[in-house]
Amino acid sequence: RLYKCLDCGKGFNHNSHLIIHHCVHTGERSFSCPGCEKTFQNSSHLIRHQWIHTGERLYECPKCRKRFNQSFALIRHQL
């Protein structure tokens, strides 16, 4: 079943994705960082942001052992 945005017509397979998308139109940001009060439209962006505060770096280059907090940064490093 396709869930359509009434504002722009974009379709989603899950209603929860439509609800998150709707924040694009309303400007609503429901997830705030307790460390700096920056707000985000979804929890995954908040979690990614919080790595800035923790210093956690989960992605390690197998060649040089340099660590990164986001997978795309490791991929960019490896190119």
Image (cartoon, rainbow, N blue to C red):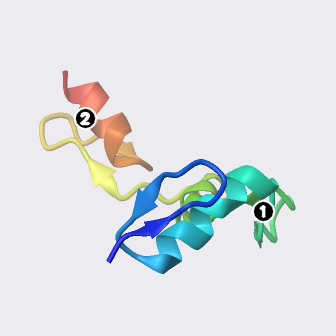
- Sort mark 1 into few (<14), some (14-19) or many (20+) by Cα contacts within 10 Å: some
Q: Where is residue 39 in the image (x, y as percent from the top left)?
A: 79, 59
Where's residue 44, x and y in %? Answer: 52, 65
Marks 1 and 2 close (CB-CB < 8 Å) = no
For the point 62% across and 60% down, the residue is 6
Q: What residue appears at the point 62 percent right and 55 percent down from the top-left corner?
A: 49
Q: Earlier in the sequence, mark 1 or mark 2?
A: 1
Q: Which mark is residue 29?
A: 1
Locate residue 73, reporting x and y percent: 37, 36
Q: Determine the secondary structure under disc 1.
A: loop
Three-letter residue code for mark 1? Arg
Q: In this view, does 56 lie to the left or right of 28?
A: left
Left/right placement of residue 57 relative to residue 44 reads left
Residue at screen point 73% across, 52% down = 25
Q: Nearer the viewer, mark 1 or mark 2?
A: 1
Give the structural element (helix, strand or loop) at label 2: helix
Residue sitting at 45 percent across and 71 percent down?
A: 3
Nearer to me, 72 or 22: 22
Can I make out residue 50 in this image?
Answer: no
Task: Look at label 2 and name its amino acid.
Answer: Ile
Quadrant for the C terminus in the image: top left
| Circle 2 residues within 10 Å: few <14, some 14–19, many ≥20 | few
Q: Mark 2 points at which residue?
A: 75
Foreground pick, 15 / 74: 15
